[in-house]
Image (cartoon, rainbow, N blue to C red):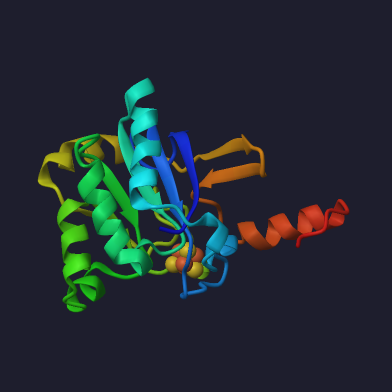
């Protein structure tokens, strides 16, 4: 499985302290995407699904986790591995939130076993491509065209309370690769960020 990063505790992409998993690879290339560094698959970031499960398990053994959020990149570009992963982590939490650039209808229309199996495991799906001009600060959504689908009815109350008066926040993680900014960013974040750091003399490779 091609995995860019795992972070914990992610507090801004779903309720509670969550394991956040960013998968590599996305062919959609939305203008203004806040994670363009994840568009390409990176052979150096290949890990077995069992290895990834062991990492998540090691976090869950040390502390309680409130949920898992999987984003990217496009998680459904690795639909088979995604399904195997979901089958192996369902005992750790029943709150699994997944972001995808596909719409739920598009995913269902593919009539693909791996995709259907993944959808059976997912608690909440936030779907649709990012549309920069429709980034209006909607809670949990990159742009207003996206939809929050509560696929497991037992999560309706939890997410209903979480989303009541919810506002997007940004959380910064210091890692050995530098600072990783997590959350739903404001419109033009990527362009503004690049222009600000270029003005300070930082080169983007
Ligand atoms: S679908 Fe998501 S990861 Fe892919 S380009 Fe669009 S915003 Fe970026």
Q: Position of residue 5 (x, y in %)?
A: 51, 47
Who is closer to the viewer here, 57 or 136? 57
Identify the residue shown where x is 16% and y is 69%.
113
Who is closer to the viewer here, 70 or 42? 42
Q: Quadrant of the N terminus?
A: bottom left
Q: Residue lying at the far right in this picture: please name it.
A: 201
Q: Quadrant of residue 100?
A: bottom left
Q: Position of residue 70 (x, y in %)?
A: 37, 50
Q: Is residue 98 left or right of residue 110?
A: right
Who is closer to the viewer here, 26 or 2? 2
Q: Is residue 69 left or right of residue 83?
A: right
Tell me if residue 64 can be seen. Answer: yes
Tell me if residue 130 can be seen. Answer: no
Q: Position of residue 73 (x, y in %)?
A: 46, 62
Q: Is residue 199 left or right of residue 56?
A: right
Q: Where is residue 97 in the image (x, y as percent from the top left)?
A: 30, 48
Q: Residue lying at the far left in this picture: please name it.
A: 153
Q: As displayed, is residue 187 above or below residue 107?
A: above
Q: Quadrant of residue 37?
A: bottom right
Q: In which quarter of the image is the C terminus?
A: bottom right
Q: In which quarter of the image is residue 42?
A: bottom right
Q: As displayed, is residue 183 above or below residue 40?
A: above
């Amino acid at each position: 499985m091609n995995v860019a990063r795992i972070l914990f505790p992610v507090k801004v992409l779903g309720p509670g302290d969550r394991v956040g998993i960013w998968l590599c690879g996305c062919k959609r290339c939305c203008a203004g995407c806040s994670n363009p560094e994840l568009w390409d698959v990176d052979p150096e970031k290949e890990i077995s699904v069992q290895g990834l499960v062991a990492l998540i398990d090691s976090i869950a053994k040390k502390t309680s986790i409130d949920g898992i959020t999987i984003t990217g990149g496009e998680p459904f570009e690795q639909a088979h591995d995604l399904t195997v992963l979901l089958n192996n982590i369902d005992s750790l939490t029943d709150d699994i939130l997944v972001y995808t650039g596909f719409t739920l209808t598009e995913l269902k229309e593919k009539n693909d076993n791996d995709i259907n199996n993944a959808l059976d495991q997912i608690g909440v799906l936030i779907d649709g491509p990012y549309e920069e001009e429709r980034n209006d600060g909607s809670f949990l959504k990159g742009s207003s065209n996206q939809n929050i689908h509560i696929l497991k009815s037992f999560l309706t109350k939890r997410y209903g309370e979480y989303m009541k008066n919810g506002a997007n926040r940004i959380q910064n993680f210091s890692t050995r690769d530098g600072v990783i900014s997590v959350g739903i960013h404001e419109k033009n974040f990527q362009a503004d960020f690049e222009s600000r750091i270029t003005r300070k003399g930082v080169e983007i490779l």
